[in-house]
Image (cartoon, rainbow, N blue to C red):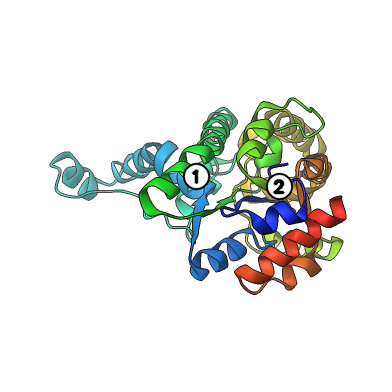
Amino acid sequence: MLYPDAKTWRAAPEKHVLFYGMSGLGKTHLSNMLRASGGWFHYSIDYRIGTRYMGELIADNAKAHAMQVPFLRDLLLSDSIYIGSNITFDNLAPVSTYLGKPGNVELGGMPIDEYRTRQDQFRRAEIAALHDTAYFIDRARRLYDYPNFICDTGGSICEWVDGNDPDDPLLTELSRHCLLIRLEGSEAHTAELIRRFDRAPKPMAYQPEFLTDAWAEYLRENNCVESEVNPDRFIRWTYARALAHRKPRYEAMAPWGVTLTPDDVGHITDAASFTDVIAKAIERRE
């Protein structure tokens, strides 16, 4: 690890960390809190994806929909209006909307082949954004004079790495520059995530093999064809399976860094307490 023991971590003049885990566990909350404390640069992977790697795709998709409206079409063709996405750290809806849902087009879905194309675009964008971590560490130090750095990852990082592979290229690269910190969820948290998702289903990013199996199983189980799939029902049906699929993948990543329990996260109220909690997590690992 970048900080092999608690003493090294406490004494480090520059602290570089990376948060990962399921959505809703506090990755962005902790990142915002540390950034607000001063001296911490907050690098959001999802924001980087939506601005640098998928910004043009997202804007073009919005323009394609606008071109179907004669009034907006004329304004676009005459360069009278501008269409772009207003992505922020706290509003990543344009990325989710672009990913979309597969199924009946009349119910807001899209053909499965188009859905797979967008999933692959996101996969490549997320991997590229993660590889940009070292660049942003240097940029934060050189341009803004920030000694400390947070990489705030999305929930799908576990889909693109293999924690059981000691030579996994992406984990090897990230662990060279940051202390990888897993935010561990509880069964109660998982159940609440499923309930929350059932109330307001959102697009997700899936490992290609998982999506292929889930799609085939859904069609078989419901005795339907692609055009008959209700998009919201499919992603609701898939969500709990996706969480179960991700759990062992997160666990396999744990030995690459340290793990924080929900109780640990609850004790973090500022930068000083964060340093203490991480030191204790390193000691537990030792």
**Lower sequence index among marks 2 and 1:** 2
Q: Is residue 221 left or right of residue 126?
A: right
SS type, badge 1: helix
| Coordinates of residue 158 in the picture (x, y in percent) | 71, 40
Which residue occupies 62% across, 41% down?
A: 205
**Image height of 56 relative to 41, above or below:** above
| Coordinates of residue 244 in the picture (x, y in percent) | 82, 46
Identify the mark at residue 99; answer none if there is no mark: none
Q: Determine the image quadrant of residue 172.
A: top right
Tag 2: residue type? Answer: Tyr
Q: Is residue 112 left or right of residue 186?
A: left
| Nearer the observer, 34 or 192 | 34
Q: CA distance from mark 2 to mark 1?
A: 16 Å
Provide the residue designation for mark 1.
137
Q: Is residue 1 visible?
A: yes
Q: Is residue 189 left or right of residue 174?
A: right
| Nearer the observer, 17 or 113 | 17
Other residues around mark 2 within 10 Å, as few (<14) / some (14–19) / many (≥20): some
| Coordinates of residue 142 in the picture (x, y in percent) | 39, 46
**Image height of 114 relative to 32, above or below:** above
Q: Is residue 103 visible?
A: no
Q: Is residue 34 left or right of residue 223?
A: left
Which residue occupies 76% across, 40% down?
A: 256
| Nearer the observer, 238 or 96 | 96
Other residues around mark 1 within 10 Å, as few (<14) / some (14–19) / many (≥20): many
Q: Determine the image quadrant of residue 266.
A: bottom right
Frontmost of labels 2 and 1 is 2
Tag 1: residue type? Answer: Ile
Provide the residue designation for mark 2.
3
SS type, badge 2: loop
